[in-house]
Image: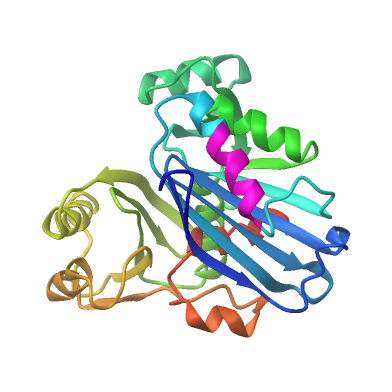
């Protein structure tokens, strides 16, 4: 459903009939936002069940003012993204301005310097930090000022995290008993997030821009080479905007023997409406449940 001169496209709108918009205190709200997407899920906390999901694709805003206007327009269209008193609101930033710092090296007074050294950091943006639960490290990240201003105004008590924190902690917690290396690739339209773990051990987290299926697969093989991972034994799991019929997925299977799609977190249940979505879609949104535990 295009709105605002085709600058916003609603991709998913799955609202279970049990959702009570007049009783927001029953629900936790998970929000994921990056430069060209915002998605939101409502969870009925008492039953640990996802009962609503919406996602919107945006034309990349040219300036912070336009971003704020797009968020306002989405809020006007949305059934979930409303400035009301949900039980709990967790917001994960998908903007790539972030860096991990081992705890022994972390000092709040130098956090901004660490981020500026490794990323294109805008000092006007909101500087934040996450403490990882499964890794002895901090994630220092920046949320664009327009995003922070809008969402914190709608939800004054909201918790802000970074999506890499949620994904890393979740993957380490659910695969802690695995003896094999595992590579999880979160696919976005222009870049991939790659996280590599082995049991409780965190090996790598990085982003790579790509312009073709071949380039996407090149970075997967590049990570294998850099970490000395055996393509015959490593487990490769895809998540995000990718399907079984995509060229990148089929090409990956030629090089990595154990390639498959992720499955949704099993410690929550899902409305039957979610059966229309492939399990790998919105994985980064569902994994935010680790932040709520």
Query: Image point 54% across, 22% down: which residue?
Result: 125
Nearer to me, 120 or 64: 64
Q: Is residue 56 left or right of residue 224?
A: right
Q: Is residue 152 left or right of residue 189?
A: right
Query: Image point 46% across, 34% down: which residue?
Result: 98
Q: Is residue 202 visible?
A: yes
> Is 75 colored magenta in this rendering?
yes
Question: From the viewer's perspective, is residue 232 above or below residue 37?
Answer: below
Nearer to me, 126 or 130: 126
Numbered range of the magenta stretch: 69-78
Which quadrant would the C terminus be assigned to in this image?
bottom right
Residue 220 point in image, percent of width and height: 22, 57
- Please identify the quarter of the rendering in which residue 212 is found: bottom left
**How did the renderer colour the structure?**
rainbow
Query: Image point 19% across, 52% down: which residue?
Result: 219
Q: Is residue 117 left or right of residue 219?
A: right
Question: From the viewer's perspective, is residue 130 above or below residue 37?
Answer: above
């Amino acid at each position: 459903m295009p709105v605002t001169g085709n600058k916003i496209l609603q991709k998913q709108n799955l609202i279970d009939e049990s959702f009570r918009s007049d009783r927001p205190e029953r629900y936790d709200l998970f929000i994921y936002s990056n430069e060209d997407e915002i998605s939101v899920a409502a969870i009925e906390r008492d039953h640990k069940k996802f009962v609503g999901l919406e996602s919107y694709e945006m034309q990349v805003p040219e300036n912070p003012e336009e971003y704020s206007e797009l968020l306002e327009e989405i809020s006007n269209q949305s059934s979930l993204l409303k400035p009301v008193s949900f039980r709990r609101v967790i917001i994960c930033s998908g903007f790539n301005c972030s860096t991990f710092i081992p705890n022994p090296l972390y000092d709040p007074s130098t956090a901004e310097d660490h981020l500026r050294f490794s990323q294109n950091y805008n000092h006007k943006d909101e500087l934040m930090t996450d403490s990882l639960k499964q890794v002895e490290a901090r994630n220092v990240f920046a949320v664009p000022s327009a995003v922070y201003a809008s969402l914190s105004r709608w939800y004054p008590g909201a918790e802000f995290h970074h999506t890499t924190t949620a994904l890393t902690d979740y993957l380490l917690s659910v695969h802690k008993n695995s003896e094999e290396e595992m590579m999880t690739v979160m696919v976005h339209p222009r870049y991939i997030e790659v996280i590599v773990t082995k049991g409780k051990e965190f090996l790598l987290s990085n982003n790579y821009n790509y312009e073709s299926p071949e380039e996407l697969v090149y970075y997967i093989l590049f990570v294998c080479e850099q970490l000395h991972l055996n393509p015959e034994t490593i487990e490769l799991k895809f998540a995000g905007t990718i399907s079984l019929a995509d060229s990148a997925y089929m090409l990956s299977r030629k090089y990595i023997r154990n390639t498959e799609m992720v499955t949704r977190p099993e410690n929550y249940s899902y409305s039957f409406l979610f059966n229309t979505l492939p399990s790998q879609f919105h994985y980064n949104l569902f994994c935010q449940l680790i932040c709520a535990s």
